[in-house]
Each structure stands twice: as C-alpha cells, then as structure tokens.
Amino acid sequence: MLSVLYYDRDPAWREHAAQRLTRDGSIEVESAGTFDEAVSLFRSNEFNAVVADPLEDEVLSFLSIVRMHEPPIPLILLMGQGHEQVVIKALNSGADRYVEKSGDPVVRLEALAGTIEQIASQEPESAALQRRNEELEFLSKTAMDFICMDDDADIYRYIAEQVSGLLPDCCVAIMLFDRDTRRSTMQVYLPEELVSRITREELGRDLVGMSFMFDRVPSAETVLGCYQLIEGMTNLYQGLFMTVPKEVCDRIEERLDIGKYHTMGFNCRDGLYGVLTISVRKGGELAHRGLIEAFVRQASVALLRHHVRGRLKESEERYRAVVESQEELICRFVPDGTHRFANEAYCRFFGLDPATVAGSRFAPAIPEDEQDALRDYFRAFSPERPDGTIEHRVRRPDGSVRWLQWHDRAFFDGNRALVEFQSVGRDVTERRIAEEALAALTADLEHRIEERTAALQIANRDLEAFTHSVSHDLRAPLRAIDGYLGIFLAKYGPDVPVDGVALIGNARESVARANRFIDDLLALAQVRRQEVRREDVDPGELARSVIAELEIAAGGRRVEYTVREMPGCRADPILLRHVYQNLIANAIKFTRPREVATIECGAETVSDGVRYFVRDNGVGFEPEDAERLFEPFARFHEARTFEGSGIGLALVKLIVERHGGRCWAEGDVDAGATFWFTLGPGGL
C-alpha cells in the first residue's frame, strides 16, 4: 500500500482526497491543512509520495524540505491557475509533477490516484538499467535523425511519429506557435486516419491546418514555458483554445475515448515554438514520461535549427535573387582603402582577383573633376549620419567609362571613430543615358508644345476673327436684303401679284433661317471657348424655368409638361441651361403632329451615378440613326415640316462632354424619343 501526504488548505478538497484517493484500498492518506502541520507529518512519517497545494510563497520552501529526504520522495503540485510562474520554478528545481487544480474535485482526484501510483512505483535496478540503455539508444538515434534531416523534411510529423511509437494507445498532436501573429496551427494529429475521420464527421473538416488564437487561454504561454509534461489541460475544448464549439469537442473526445491530457512546449532561447499534446485513453496512464520530456527538449533544439535554417534559406534565396538579377557590387573597406571583402561581381567589374582582394588597397579610377565631390561625400559621414548615396563615373580596366550608384554605410566604434565602410553599388549607365535621352526628348517635346500652343493661339485668334466676321460682316448683307425686301413690299405691295408677294415672303424667311443658323454657329463656338464653372444646381428647377420660357413656342397646342424630382448635381448652370433649352425645344417641335403632346424631364440613379433624361411622344426617329443625331448639321426630317439648323443636339453633346459625361438617344419612328445625358464624376 502506498502512503501519501496530502497538504491542502481547502477542507473540501481534503475530504474528497481522503475518500477518492483511498477508494480502491491501494493508497492511504495523511492530510494536513497548514504548512507547519504538513512539515511535521512529513518529518515524522514515511511517505511514498507528497501531493500539495501550498501558498505561493511556501512552494519553494516546501520543495526544499521534501527534496532533502533520502531516498527522494516524489512531489506532485496540485495548484490552481494564476501560479504558473512559481510552479515552473518548482518544476525546474526538482518537483516531479504539476496537475492543474480545476474542474470537479471528484474527477480530478480519481485521475490523480493513477498518477500517484505510477510515480511512486519502484522499478528493479536491472530493469531500470535496461530501460535507461533503451532510452539512451532512442535519444541517440533521434538526435542523429535530426542532424541528418533534410531542410524540406516534415519535422513535425517525425516528432509525432516518434512519440506515437512510444505511446501506441495515445493520440499525439503537434501545433506550431507563431509569436508574431499569436496563433497556433495544427501541424499533425496521430493516429491520422482515425482522428481525421472522426473530426470530419463531427466538425466537417480536418483539425490539421486549423489555426487558433493562442491568447484565448491567458496562461498558456507561461505554463508551456515549463520543461516538463504537465496536466494543465482538462478537455479538448480548452486544448483547441475554445475555438471549436464545446459540444463538438465533447463528442470527439468521447469517440476517441480520451481521459487525460499531457502537454509540453517546444522551448528554445527564442521562446515557445510549438506545443506537444498527448491524449491518454480513459483508465490509462502516461508511460515513458521522462524519455518523452528528454525527447521534446531535444526536439526543441532541432526545431530551432529547422526554423533558423529555414529563415536562413529564405534569406539566402532573396539575397541570391537580388545579386543575380541586379549584379550588385558589394565591398567592405577601412578608411585607408584597404578592402576587407569584395563579392564576385565587384571583382569582375573592376578586374580584381577574388582570392587576393581582401587585405589589398584599391581605389577605382574616377575622373578628376568628380574626385573633390567624392572626398567631401565620405568626409560627411558621422554617427548621426551613417548612410549616404552618391553617383559618379569610373574608368574600367578596358578603358570604358561607366556610371555607378553607391549606397554606403559607415560604422563607428564606441569612441565615435570611423572603423569601416560597407558599399553596395550598381551600374546605372543605361539609366543615365536614358535620363539624358529623356531630358533631350522632354526639351524637344516642350519646344513642340510651345510651337503648337502658339499655333493654337493663332487658330483661336482666327476663329475669333471669323466669329466677328460672321457676327458683323455676314449679318449686315442679310439685314440689308431683308430691309430692301420690306421696303419693296411697303412701296409696291399693292401692285405686286400675289405669287410675287409669296416669293418675297419665302426670301425673307430664308434670311431669318440664315440668321438663326449664324446664331447657332456662334453659340457652338462660344461653348467651345467657355470655361466650365461647376456649382450646385437643381436640375428640376432649371427644367421648369426653361419650360416657362418655351411654352410660348407651343402656341395654342395642348402640351402636358412633367418635371419629376431629380437629384441635385454640380454643373455649370449656364451651360446646363443650354442643354435643357435645346432638348425641350426639340421635344416641343417634334410633337407638333400630336393632338396632346407629353414632355417629361427626370432622372434615374444607377450603379455608376445619375443619368438625366427628356422624353416626348413625338415623331421619333429611325433607331439606326441614334448615334448620328448628335452630329453637327445632321437632319433627318423635312426642313419645311420641322425647321432647324442641325446644331442644337451637337451643342448638347459638346456641353455634356465638357462636363466629363456622355449623351445618347433612344426611340423609334412614330413612338417618341428619350434623350439621356450624364455629367461625369464631378457632377454628383
């Protein structure tokens, strides 16, 4: 029978311990409720094991008293959360086991009974010697495997398979911990086929590859910093950092028949790299604890090496890619010019022997007119300004002159004395040639722009002169023709035959059309020159104002006008008024054949903005003519029936495009027409 000292300040736990630990008759328990009582019982009795939950400041003192006993008596710390730091110190100082004091005391203490029996059982000396030899052989073999392992090998699977080989009835999981993201990622979970099948059925996916927020269990990193296996995790839900629903975890746990969890971190000088979790089946106990702990410590070093070599390989690949693609010239030299290092590209560029360049003094041949600037550049380095960049020409051994760009860094000792320069250079001759060519091209382009600007200014002046001529010189004869015809009718009207009066009337109408045509041409020219000045505009109010002005043009006809609510916009109000004047005037004109004309102004909001429209029930147009409607002087109806110059819609298109928008038309013969326009990104 095993004799156990149970020290706990909680009387409820002492009572449960007296009942549960002695349940099968293989353990007898002596209980203590204070430190002094526990020490007194320990010194006056012989025990096979000690289980204790001391105060935090008692832990190390109590441990030192227990460790003084010969032969050594195992000490199991049964302590709650929040004491992880002192527990780790105790484990690293000789305590045998840590079991987290949480959950149902009955369940926890019944599980603890098996742990006590295992840890307190004695092993025959010969069997112990054989076991130690086998463990040494295992550790030697795995150490050699780690040394010979390729960088591309799956080290996580190898570690899990070795532990699983020692514990064939247990489940073994390994997670990788990323300190930057504070996440743990499941790398392997054995037995793979069984675990994968169950997790896919219960969770809908494999656990391998899943990532978990490590900090959801606040004490996890501290506890796993211990160099021993601990029983801190009580269930799978906690082991998966409370990420997977608890009911799913419970079902997986039940199907895998898991009883206890033992965890240990892979720790190295940089901290935690990963986590090993061993799930023991119900009723079972963990075997080979000491060997597994030693293997995990050994594997931690291998993992550190694996990670370092991986990072080094990535760094080398990046460095190699840069050097091979850019042929950078790299060297280190002291202030007197003695080189300590030069890479192959540097030696090849300057014609140096890589085998002898280290320790030799070398200075590139630099044109005389650039040497003073280079000396001033190197004198300017200081501890406060250790970095610099310069470009200069060099003459190569073959006589060719090249441009080099250097990025230099100066290193100083503790006394602020300059020790060394490190330089990284690249040949930028092609870039300099390209820059010179670009500068010449830019100068030429600027010259051409100036010439074309001057030509454009001349063209604008000519256009203004033409506009002035049209406005004055062309109007004068038209006014004279109209005036003479009017005088003729006034003086000789009674003597002129009826058909002669009609001919004179037609002539005066032609003069009027010519004047309107001139007005439209002038308006088109003015819009081309006018600057677009955007401001907030209410399109609905603008449309109503235009309708009020144009209603007279409808004469006594019945016209029903509808102006719907429209989103406000940012546009030039004068130019936008021209758009509505032309579109609404067109609608009034082309609805003449209708007994009741309908003209509607509105807008639609679509994914790419707002589009405005003017719709009528007039004579419409052939659909294939839709794109040509906005061309200058385009006409598709008889001039006698529908007067006009063909400039109005061209003016609409010009104004809309100057706002960054577009316009289009929809309609059919005798089915009305809808004219759409947008005002570009700045119109919202």
Image (cartoon, rainbow, N blue to C red):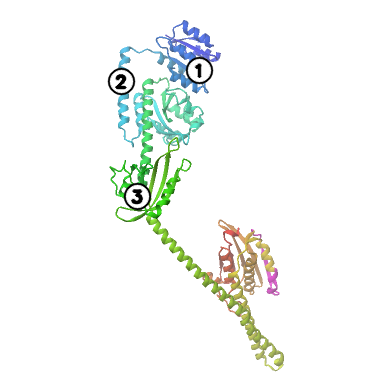
Give the CA separation, mark 1 to mark 2: 37 Å
Within-10-Å neighbours for mark 3: few <14, some 14–19, many 20+: few
**Percent from the top left, x then y, of residue 205?**
43, 36
Q: Which residue is mark 2?
A: 134
Q: Is residue 203 above or below residue 594?
A: above
User: What residue is pinned by disc 3?
Assistant: 364
Q: Earlier in the sequence, mark 3 or mark 2?
A: 2
The location of residue 355, given as percent across then percent down, is 28, 42
Q: Which residue is mark 1?
A: 106
Marks 3/1 in contact by CB < 8 Å: the verdict is: no
Decide if residue 635 is in sight here.
no
Q: Is 247 on the left or on the right of 518, as rendered?
A: left
Residue 551 among those drawn in magenta: yes
Q: Specify the quadrant that holds the N terminus.
A: top left
Pick the front one: 550 or 579: 579
Span shown in magenta? 548-567
Q: In the image, which is nearer the foreground, mark 3 or mark 1?
A: 3
Q: Residue at x 69, y 66 (%)?
A: 545
160 or 522: nearer the viewer:
522
Residue 153 sits in quarter: top left
Q: Helix, strand or loop at disc 1?
A: helix
Tell me the amino acid under the disc marked 2: Glu
Secondary structure found at label 2: helix
